[in-house]
């Protein structure tokens, strides 16, 4: 299969397990779940979707030479995300504690109790290993380290809105150094960090974003 990705361009994916997972109902639902959670009508920036981001994480891991198990984990890392993404953290109270990880609490159970588990078993993967994201250093790591999850959604915002000019340079400068994602030059590292911080304070952790999440989650709770 040839995938045309808006960030990484044209890439080929031939691994049977990845191809089957891409068409699984639990993955396809991510096509309808926006990255930011709050619908475009009520958000101040244009959304992209979790399915696109999940594929992007897989492709970035592939570019960095990650093994197939880590690519599978990357493709599935958001499969358990709630219908309104991180708005769920506000509904269930975790955002007020500074946490946006509600879907990660039941990530393993989601994989175990859906068709994803059967697909993994069929191709010789252990679901419990795939769902344990901390096993995969290129996919998942603590801030301020780089990881495929954070780098991909940052690159997508650079590409679609903030600073498209630096995307190609950032991608070409990323390398796998002993299982850790790093930049191979200071200039690219600086540009990525500077723009990442602009996203952090201008979008993800901004007062306006917090208020939109608060108001939208309150509306959902009232509707319920």
Image (cartoon, rainbow, N blue to C red):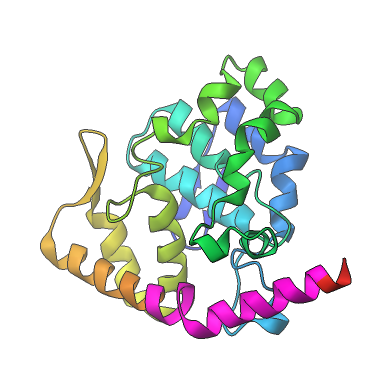
Q: Position of residue 118 (x, y in %)?
A: 72, 21
Quadrant showing the C terminus: bottom right
Image quarter of residue 16:
top right
**Residue 176 place in picture, x, y as percent:** 25, 40
Q: Is residue 11 above or below residue 185?
A: above
Question: Is residue 202 in the magenta section?
Answer: yes
Which stretch did the figure color magenta? 200-221
Percent of width and height locating residue 13 = 53, 37
Residue at screen point 61% across, 61% down: 86
Residue drawn at x 42%, y 81% as measured from the top left: 202
Q: Is residue 150 above or below residue 124?
A: below
- In magenta segment, residue 62: no
Relative side of 7 to 127, left or right: left
**Residue 131 appearing in the image:** yes
Residue at the image position 46 percent from the left and 61 percent from the top: 153
The image quarter containing residue 115 is top right
């Amino acid at each position: 299969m040839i995938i045309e990705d808006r960030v990484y361009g044209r890439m080929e994916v031939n691994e049977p397990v990845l191809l089957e997972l891409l068409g699984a109902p639990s993955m396809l639902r991510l096509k309808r779940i926006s990255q930011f959670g709050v619908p475009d009508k009520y958000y101040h920036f244009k959304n992209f979707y979790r399915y696109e981001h999940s594929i992007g994480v897989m492709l970035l891991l592939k570019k960095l030479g990650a093994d197939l198990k880590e690519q599978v984990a990357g493709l599935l890392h958001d499969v358990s995300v709630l219908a309104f993404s991180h708005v769920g953290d506000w509904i269930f109270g975790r955002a007020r504690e500074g946490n946006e990880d509600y879907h990660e609490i039941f990530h393993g159970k989601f994989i175990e109790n859906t068709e994803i588990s059967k697909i993994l078993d069929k191709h010789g993967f252990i679901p419990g290993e795939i769902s344990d994201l901390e096993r995969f250093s290129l996919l998942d790591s603590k801030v301020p380290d780089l990881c495929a999850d954070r780098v991909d959604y940052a690159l997508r915002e650079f590409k679609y809105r903030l600073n498209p000019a630096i995307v190609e340079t950032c991608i070409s400068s990323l390398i796998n150094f002993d299982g850790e994602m790093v930049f191979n030059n200071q200039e690219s590292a600086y540009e990525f960090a500077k723009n990442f911080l602009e996203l952090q304070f201008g979008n993800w952790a901004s007062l306006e974003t917090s208020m939109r999440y608060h108001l939208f989650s309150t509306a959902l709770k009232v509707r319920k």
